[in-house]
Amino acid sequence: MPVPQSRGLVPRPLLRENAYQAIRDAIVDGTLAPGERLADADLVAWLGISRTPIREALTRLEQTGLVRTKPGRYTIVSPLDVRAVRDAQSVTAAMHELAVRAAVPNLSAVELEAMRAANARFATALREDEVDAAVAADDAFHAVPVTACANQALSRVLEQFTPLLRRVEQLRFSSLSGRGSVAQHDRIIALCAAGDAEGAAAASRANWQTLAPLLDTLPAEPDRS
């Protein structure tokens, strides 16, 4: 059988999205450390795709604050900017509050059960010190009302700012300070099930604001210019 003549069976937007997700996740979980240089050749070899979608992904990551570029000089993983994380926390807490308030009147029994199941996985991951699994379960928990509220603008804002917070959540969920989130999630679920939109929204905002004490302990990263 001759080699097919068609080209581009995997669309470039998909390659760009795959590259974005892979690099983003490696930054969030600490595989790519703050200040680490991101050479195109290394990323091409790692991901097995061409330079163009990688550069597009890096541009997007720079917009989210995870990557820093000096044109013609270097691209690095951004040092952890505590001020930027505080700003992201304020915006993210407000967006989740809005999502829960809008979602509660329409949450189904299936969606409430999905939140319970995600929180059970979250609790198990914390007990077993599986930080990546804890972050994934926490994402799944909060994704239920975000999806249910069907606000695309809100989803885009969260997509931009949440990765900054997840770098800090890695530290939080690897320590005892993250254990309280299980009970907070249970409270959010109970208020959602009771139809208390305002109470659930306030509880969701409070849950996201619990990062504040951890931010106070973070040293400022040196700026590499």
Image: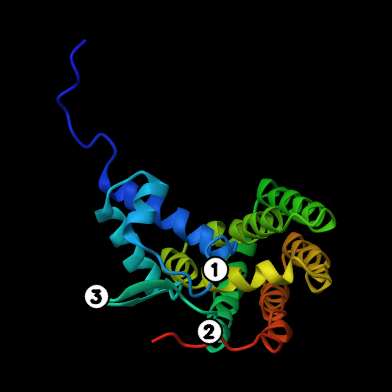
Sequence-wise first label, 3 or 1: 1
Q: Are marks 1 and 2 in contact (CB under 8 Å)?
A: no
Query: Where is residue 123 shown, x and y percent of the image?
Result: 81, 56
Sequence-wise first label, 1 or 2: 1
> Which amino acid lies under the numbered mark 2 shown in the image of this protein?
Asp
Tag on residue 72? 3
> Which amino acid lies under the numbered mark 1 shown in the image of this protein?
Ala
**Circle 3 crowding by C-alpha within 10 Å: few under 14, some 14–19, many from 20:** few
> Which amino acid lies under the numbered mark 3 shown in the image of this protein?
Gly
Residue 106 seen in render:
no
Tag on residue 33? 1
Residue at which label 2 appears: 81
- Indicate left or right for 174 with 152 as reference: right
Quadrant including the C terminus = bottom left
Query: Where is residue 84 shown, x and y percent of the image?
Result: 51, 85
Observer-nearest of 167 and 36: 36
Query: Where is residue 94 shown, x and y percent of the image?
Result: 57, 79
Q: Secondary structure at mark 1?
A: loop
Sequence-wise first label, 3 or 2: 3
